[in-house]
Image (spheres, helix red, strand yellow):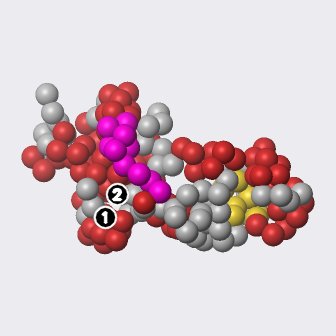
Amino acid sequence: MLTVKEVEAKARMLEDQNYEFRAFLKRNADADELDEQFKQLHNELFANYDCCKCCNCCCACHIVVEDSEIAAIAESVGQSTESFIIEHLTKGEEGEYHLKSSPCEFLDESGRCKIQHFKPNVCKKYPHTDQPRRLSSMYSIIESAKVCPVVFEILERLKKLYRFGNKRKRN
């Protein structure tokens, strides 16, 4: 598997190929089967991967915080909801809240999340490769491959599984 330092450069180098693979999957893959393949690879690869040694997502992604999560996070860091919003959040174009800082200010020096039990759902679910409807979210998967070595590896394994270089779907 690529190191965190290698992943962005390699993913950018393969970006056109990844977009071609997305188009190939749109034409050839069964959506439910692809979801199962993503989930299986996600479980296999994350079983032996320590995200805290990478933390690239905590440094590269813009974190959305749902309204329903704000009070618990604020309390976990000893702030009122109002002061937490003022100090740590900004509103997006559609009224959603985002953390102001990047990398995430709740990441400690050892790569551990200081708000682990209260972290936003988007963080808990990242990189979303075990979620349904992967075929319709391939653009975000391709973007995540620039950030997460596991997502990069999932895409590369799927290309082999689908014999993408041969332009033939597996039997």
Foreground of the two, 80 or 167 = 80
Instruction: Classify residue 74 as left or right of residue 7.
Output: right
Instruction: Classify residue 165 as left or right of residue 124.
Output: left
**Residue under the point 60% across and 56% down:** 113
CA–CA distance in space, label 2 to label 1: 7 Å
Asked which secondary structure carries label 1, the reply is loop
Instruction: Classify residue 86 as left or right of residue 102.
Output: right
Disc 2 or disc 1, which is closer to the eye?
A: 1
Q: What residue would you read off at disc 2?
A: 149
The residues colored magenta run 43-52
The three-letter amino acid code for the residue at tag 2 is Pro
**Residue under the point 13% across and 50% down:** 165
State which tag comes first along the sequence, 2 or 1: 1
Q: Are marks 2 and 1 in contact (CB under 8 Å)?
A: yes
Q: Quadrant of the N terminus?
A: bottom left
- The main secondary structure of the magenta stretch is helix
Outermost residue on the left side: it is: 166
Percent coordinates x, y for residue 128 in the rendering: 48, 44
**Residue under the point 75% across and 47% down:** 69
Q: What residue would you read off at disc 1?
A: 3
Asked which secondary structure carries label 2, the reply is helix
